Image: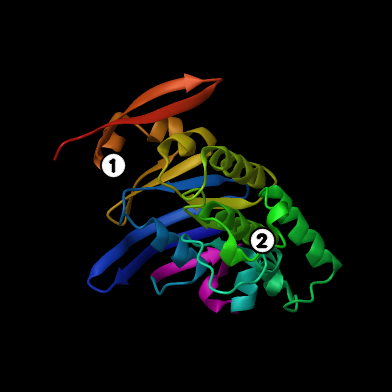
Amino acid sequence: MIEADNITVQLGERRALDGVSLACATGEFICVLGANGAGKTTLLKAIAGLVPYEGRVTLQGRDTQAMKPSERGRLVAYLPQGHHAHWPITAREAVAIGRVPHGAAPGRPNPHDEQAISRALEATDATALASRPITALSGGERARVMLARALAVEAPILLADEPISALDPAHQLAVMALLAQTAAHGVTVLAALHDLTLAARFATRVVVLVAGRIAADGPPRTVLTPQLLATAFGVTALHLEHDGAPLLVSWTQIAG
């Protein structure tokens, strides 16, 4: 579904990605992990075609640089971090923007668009927010609405940058479960995350970036070793198991 080959991104004097190669299959839920500045956001943006890069990215076997923006918009739903809102449109109108790549006219979605919008709002527990101005929502409420906008695209690829950073614990769990369910239904989900505990529990695979390069790639149980956690994050962690799932808890910072 996604193939990134030798991707390099230069941001000013800093090399944000340095020869990253990655292949993502249909139905995978992959968490991209790394310390601040490791290149997580840049990797998602490169795959989405939002930053210039050297190398090659293909989606469903097609080079993204040969695609029209509208074609790429139907293949890839992108959820940026920050969840900024500058206009007092309603939450439902914000979610409806996700249907634009399919030709939906602003303010005039057709019945199929309306169904997609309603499904996305329901999936993110945001139906009750639909009529409220998005500028009046809390950060967590706005985060759920922006995720609903991405889901409303109904694209085969979902790129989510820090999708749980503004959420309370209950909604963090709900969103991670939703992303896992979305992947189980055949969508390729690639999410940049800081939460090691939730990544270890929900992801089918983790990709760990260190200084713009892939340091590890594979199932959480085998990748998130004490040595890797020390190298990539400067922490020790507790490795436990609960209800058959791995439970990883960051415990101490490694000095120096």
Residue drawn at the location 31% of the way across and 49% of the way down = 35
Residue drawn at the location 81% of the way across and 60% of the way down = 115
Q: Can residue 219 be seen in this view?
A: no
Mark 1 secondary-structure assignment = helix
Q: Is residue 194 left or right of residue 245?
A: left
- Where does the magenta region start and end? 54-68
The reply to whether dot 1 and dot 2 touch (C-beta < 8 Å) is no
Instruction: Classify residue 218 by image quadrant.
Output: top left
Q: Residues within 10 Å of mark 2 (few under 14, many from 20)?
A: some
Residue 161 percent across, percent down from the top left: 48, 56
Q: Earlier in the sequence, mark 1 or mark 2?
A: 2
Residue 233's tag is 1
Mark 2 secondary-structure assignment = loop
Which residue does the numbered mark 2 point to in the structure image? Answer: 155
Q: In this view, does 20 lie above or below 170?
A: below
Q: In which quadrant will I find the N terminus?
A: bottom right
Residue 2 percent across, percent down from the top left: 54, 58
